[in-house]
Image (tube, grey):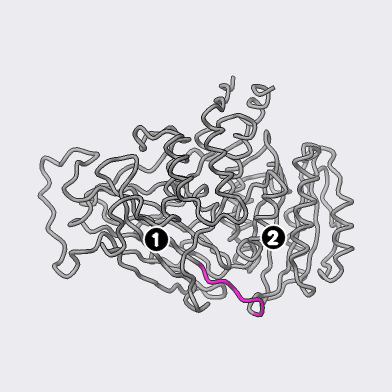
Amino acid sequence: MGAQRGQVIGRDKFSNAPQNAFKAVAQEPVSTFSLDVDTASYSYVRAALNQNLLPRPEAVRVEEMINYFPYDYAAPVRAEEPFSTAATVMPNPWQPGHKLLRIGVKGYSLQSQERPAANLVFLVDTSGSMNEANKLPLLVKSLGMLVDTLRPEDKVSIVTYAGSAGVVLPPTKASDKASILAALDRLQAGGSTAGGEGIRLAYQQAEANFDAKAVNRVLLATDGDFNVGITDAGELRGFVERERGKGIFLSVLGFGMGNLNDAMMQELAQNGNGVAAYIDTLNEARKVLVEEATSSLFPIAKDVKIQVEFNPAAVSDYRLIGYETRMLRTEDFNNDKVDAGDVGSGASVTAIYDIVPAGATRPVDESRYQAAQSVAPADKPDEYAFVKIRYKLPKSETSRLITTPVNHAGEAATLAQAPADARFAVAVAGFGEWLRGGKYVGALKPDDIIALASGARGEDPYGYRAEFVNLVRAAKTAKGLPQQP
């Protein structure tokens, strides 16, 4: 049975971006990427391991695994400057002589009176492949949970697509919850995914009820059939981008295995100023759509970019762990025309670099011909790096800048002295890298990850961290996917 299921989930589609490599500070001192708050990869990895199967390496996006967990970063106090930044440097547990730089970003939490109204359109895949317990029935329950979090003045529409597209529910105030839930309960799966005009109908509903002061968002819920009325991937991406320019955003919720087009999920959500989440259980639906509803639906900033410049006097080489599909060019950072990630209310985002201190054994040979780099200016001798975050407020097209130096004051002499949150994030990063094949984590084994995570669990009110430890245990005996013919 396990092999048969493995053949099914082996047909899911993922982007296969190669892992980030080490960069020499002498040649490339600046690292730039788009902040990412998606968590779909972690849920998918969990679903595979719960079937006693190791996920395919390309299904593992390490940053999404790290960012699945909440971290206790100090919160900013003003919506006008919506991010606080914290940095910790600590020894690298899997590479002696290296250090890890953890950068934590915390978003401003909108107070209830600050939260804008919501104009939501549920675009639901009702094709025949959705007729499984972990697909349409779970989808209906999940969206029902989300409806419970809405305020009376918020509005919901429901559009379906399959053999044909149709409006199941016109814009309806959340105060009439009974009508919304009844419309969800009537949804049935059947037929092929022949398209229709599902995506256009959904955006028409959003436009018909458009409110410039509200969050106008389409939530596409599917098991992976993206034949929503625009069949060309480039045209679909362009359509979503144009609608984003009008103020209508798109988020994508994935369900089930065997038909999942994760690559398209990611691309559409990134171009639609939304999140991509994978929902495999009712508990995951509760996490994404209830506990984290405000961060999933209500942005505090858009086009959020991060740029880290390393000090050659302190660091010889660095490697960003994860974010392979979010990398930007150096010049993109100051270009307000370049789209980047969006961060919702109260969200936390973590990035981890593997850094080689100056003077330590390097992962690449020294250059034969390049002159030695000059030492950093005397007034910056204690800095490892300089972190810059550029963002736009939700209704603005002009970016703002926040900067933070990373100095020795934020360094832990031993891993045990690092904050528990930092150690737990490192354990998750190590597990993600191990699942990717272990190229950069030396002799790190699941038992090492279990010990590190167990000692750093800290407060765990929802049991997410305990669940992670059990997943690592499951990975020790999980089977690899069979090769596809």
Left or right position of 222 against 372: right
Which residue is found at the position 40% from the left and 72% from the top? 401
Spatial CA span between label 1 and label 2 = 35 Å
User: Is residue 394 positioned above or below 476 on the image?
Assistant: below
Residue ID at (69%, 58%)? 289
Q: Give the range drawn in magenta.
A: 107-113
Is residue 36 left or right of 85 when viewed as pictured? Answer: right
Judging from the image, what secondary structure is the residue with disc 2 in?
Answer: helix
Q: Which residue position holds label 2?
A: 290
Q: Any magenta on residue 109?
A: yes
58, 196: nearer the viewer: 58
Could you tell whether 66 is left or right of 164 in the image? left
**Residue 441 part of the magenta segment:** no
Magenta: main secondary structure equals: loop
Q: In this view, does 47 lie to the left or right of 136?
A: left
Across and down, in percent, residue 330 comes to 34, 58
Residue at numbered disc 1: 332
The quadrant in which the C terminus is found is top right
Q: Which residue lies furthest to the top in this view?
A: 485
